[in-house]
Image (tube, rainbow, N blue to C red):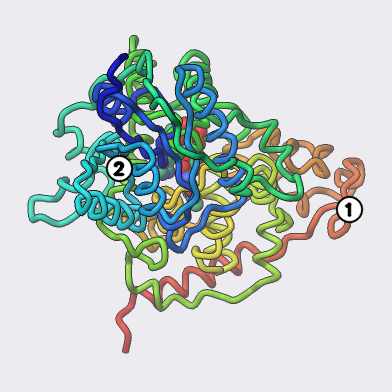
Amino acid sequence: MQREGPCTVVWFRRDLRLSDHSALRAAVRRGVVVPVFIWSEEEEGSWPLGAASRWWLHQSLLQLDQALRQRGSRLVLRAGPIVDALLDVIKQTRASAVYWSRRYEPDAQRVEQQVEQALRARGVEGLGFAGTLLYDPVGIRTRTGEPYQVFSAFWRRCQQEAAPGHPEPVPETIRGPAQWPASAALTSFALEPRIDWAAGLRQSWQPGELGAQQRLRHFVAKHLAEYAVERDRPDREGTSRLSPHLHFGEISPRQVWTAVRERSDGSDLRRASERYQIELGWREFAYYLLVHFPDTPACSLRPEFERFPWQDAPKLLHAWQRGRTGYPIVDAGMRQLWHTGWMHNRVRMIVASFLTKNLLITWRAGAKWFWDTLVDADLANNTLGWQWTSGCGADAAPYFRIFNPVRQGERFDPNGDYVRRWVPELAGLPARWIHQPWAAPAATIKEAGVRLGETYSEPIVDLAGTRARALEAFRKLRSPAR
Ligand SMILES: Cc1cc2nc3c(=O)[nH]c(=O)nc-3n(C[C@H](O)[C@H](O)[C@H](O)COP(=O)(O)OP(=O)(O)OC[C@H]3O[C@@H](n4cnc5c(N)ncnc54)[C@H](O)[C@@H]3O)c2cc1C
């Protein structure tokens, strides 16, 4: 009879892949492997998964199970509490170790410590592996020992660390136990919506490791070369759209980093590749800030912003959420988000600036809406994005930088194709007027079949007036209290 060897539980979290997975490889080297996913929101703290993320997670777990089965293994599903579920699997399999990939969200770290303690108390080895980030955020500090708050300095410092290593392949075989422990049914987690609103998500995405790898290959082959110039154009397919795959760990940042660097032959490609690496750097910075300033998902990093006179304006908030502000590029972005669970980065900045500066609604309300609707909703990146745009975070856009949605639209969607796609009621307008239909001559509006206030909203606020109001509020915040 073949000896089974020691058994290791691999606790899957936000690392739903088999390739470049250090914890899985270490477990395979040790002997028998029991892959486990535990459905519990303990790790998410005050940020339980939004509806779009839940949909994604369901698909991703299906894919992971399939990939494991192709290698003679399977994914054991359990419901939390996490420590209890892990201890029960250990009992059923007589596992002597639990391996996992580290997470950096404050509540996930807290749970990790509880797991470590519980394992230690029972003499079971517990070990967390790197894999979520390129650089370990804990040790990186300024010369005076403070955490960095400026991206360029942080990123320069990262470059002094050892370069990210080469990704590891999928283990060829994953040996399972003679008897598998009990597993819950995926449907019992009720992750998919009860009323099926997810058709737009299905059309737009292929969750799982295979989908992630295909998207990376497609991006590197077709779009990387133009990334530096096209990345700001929402009307083009200029960015990688890897964010949900990176968030769920279906692909590792090291795999993306390596694929992009390997293509950097020739000066144009090198420039594009460097530009792309900087964006991965912003992801590193976001996690770094979350580790060193764990309160920021709820509180502004710059404390004076806690005194900011945000408005309570539910009707305006609702118009923004539904893409009915009367500003075409804002509405296009909000509708793209609702339909596909994703929005282009340039447009995220435009809609976030509009909400926090023109509507004077707190960034927290925007972050919450994004949290529920984005398939890439990510505590670190979302917090950084909102605090950066509203001016209350690290290395934030200066307070006087208020995006003008008309100018932004004309500059980054010059032919109006993005607006035409997501705001079809304006499709008949010529490019000259599509970003400001209220200013178009009456005959042009009529010919395009647009009736402002009927087929398309009138602007819900006046840009110049709200801009002046925001600047005044920011100015007061900066002057010392009397
Ligand atoms: C208000 C606001 C909210 C945001 N919320 C999120 C969020 O919840 N989740 C999320 O993943 N990103 C968020 N972002 C960052 C950014 O918009 C997305 O990461 C990006 O649009 C994803 O598209 P992509 O994969 O095609 O990006 P690419 O341009 O192809 O970039 C590659 C990868 O780099 C990372 N990245 C790129 N830009 C940023 C950035 N500014 N900050 C941090 N990481 C970045 C992402 O992981 C991305 O997948 C937010 C930005 C703003 C302004």
Could you tell me the amino acid type at mark 2?
Arg
Decide which of 220, 453 is in the foreground and name it: 220
Q: Label 1 crowding class (10 Å Cα cut-off): few <14, some 14-19, many 20+?
A: some
Q: Is residue 64 left or right of residue 136?
A: right
Mark closer to the chain start, 2 or 1: 2
Q: Which residue is at a point 25% across and 21% down the rendered structure image? A: 29
Q: Is residue 370 visible?
A: no
Compared with residue 126, is residue 256 higher up or lower down, i.e. above or below? above
Image quarter of the C terminus: bottom left
- Could you tell me which residue is drawn at 78 percent across and 60 percent down? 458
Report if residue 182 is visible in the image: yes
* Helix, strand or loop at mark 2: loop
Label 2, on which residue? 102
In the image, farthest residue toward the bottom: 482
Label 1 residue SS: loop
Considering depth in this image, is 76 or 288 the residue closer to the camera? 76
Residue 126 in the image: state x and y as whole percent: 24, 43
Location of residue 220 in the rendering, given as x and y in whole percent from the top left corner:
46, 17
Indicate whether 365 appears above or below 83: below
In the rendered image, the quadrant that contains the N terminus is: top left
Q: Name the residue at 91% across, 44% down.
A: 449
Q: Is residue 434 above or below residue 22?
A: below
Q: Is mark 1 within 8 Å of ligand 1?
A: no
Outermost residue on the top side: it is: 266
Disc sitting over residue 451 in the figure? 1
